[in-house]
Image (spheres, rainbow, N blue to C red):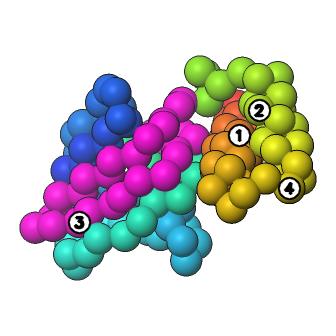
């Protein structure tokens, strides 16, 4: 299988840099798959679960926040505000964050505060989904 180079960066630290067999990233239109030879493009990344297959065939997942995906000349660059591997995720914290965000969304605040709460909830849900998917895979 052909490989491609990917650099995946969280706002304050690098997450992954190297060759991959495949990558699936949540964008506004749904999950978007990338393989070697993909056409050049730029797309917004939305909170969700990212899947990637390494050179040795290992399938990995991570909770990913908002940002951008760029494919250019056979190389992939992902820049996001948050990124966590399932081992780093605290389910209790994610559930509390979601509850707090839902409360803020229903507090009849202004549109900006509602949008911030909505994004916080989306990140919490993506953490929860990544952790649950990881636990199911590793039973």
Point out the tag, 4 or 2, that comes first from the N-terminus.
Answer: 2
| Mark 4 or 1: the one toward you | 4
| Mark 2 or 3: the one toward you | 2
| SS for callout 4 | loop
Left or right? Give the position of 91 relative to 27: right
Q: Is residue 104 above or below residue 15?
A: below
Q: Which residues are magenta?
A: 58-85
Q: How many C-alpha atoms fall within 10 Å of the one at disc 3: few (<14), some, or many (≥20)?
A: some
The residue wearing badge 4 is 108
Residue 129: x and y in percent read 73, 45
Asked whether disc 1 touches disc 2, contact meaning CB atoms under 8 Å apart, the reply is yes
Q: Is residue 60 above or below residue 1?
A: above
Residue 71 numbered tag: 3
| Mark 3 or 1: the one toward you | 1
- Is residue 13 visible in the rendered image? The answer is yes
Q: Residue furthest front?
A: 110
Is residue 117 one of those drawn in magenta?
A: no
Q: Is residue 67 above or below residue 130?
A: below
The residue wearing badge 1 is 124
Q: Residue at x 22, y 39 (%)?
A: 18
Point out the tag, 3 or 1, that comes first from the N-terminus.
Answer: 3
| SS for callout 2 | helix
Left or right? Give the position of 45 relative to 99: left
Q: Residue at x 34, y 27 (%)?
A: 12
Q: Residue at x 52, y 45 (%)?
A: 64
The residue wearing badge 2 is 97
């Amino acid at each position: 299988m052909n490989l491609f180079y990917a650099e995946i960066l969280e706002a304050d630290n690098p997450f992954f840099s190297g060759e991959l067999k495949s990558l699936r990233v949540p964008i506004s239109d749904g999950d978007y798959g990338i393989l070697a030879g993909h056409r050049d493009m730029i797309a917004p990344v939305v909170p969700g679960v990212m899947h990637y297959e390494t050179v040795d065939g290992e399938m990995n997942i991570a909770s990913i926040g908002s940002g951008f995906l760029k494919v250019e000349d056979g190389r992939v660059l992902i820049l996001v505000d948050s990124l966590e591997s399932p081992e780093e995720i605290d389910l209790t914290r994610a559930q509390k964050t979601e509850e707090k965000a839902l409360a803020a969304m229903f507090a009849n605040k202004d549109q900006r505060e509602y949008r911030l709460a909505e994004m916080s909830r989306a990140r919490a849900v993506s953490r929860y989904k990544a952790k649950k998917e990881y636990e199911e895979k590793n039973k």
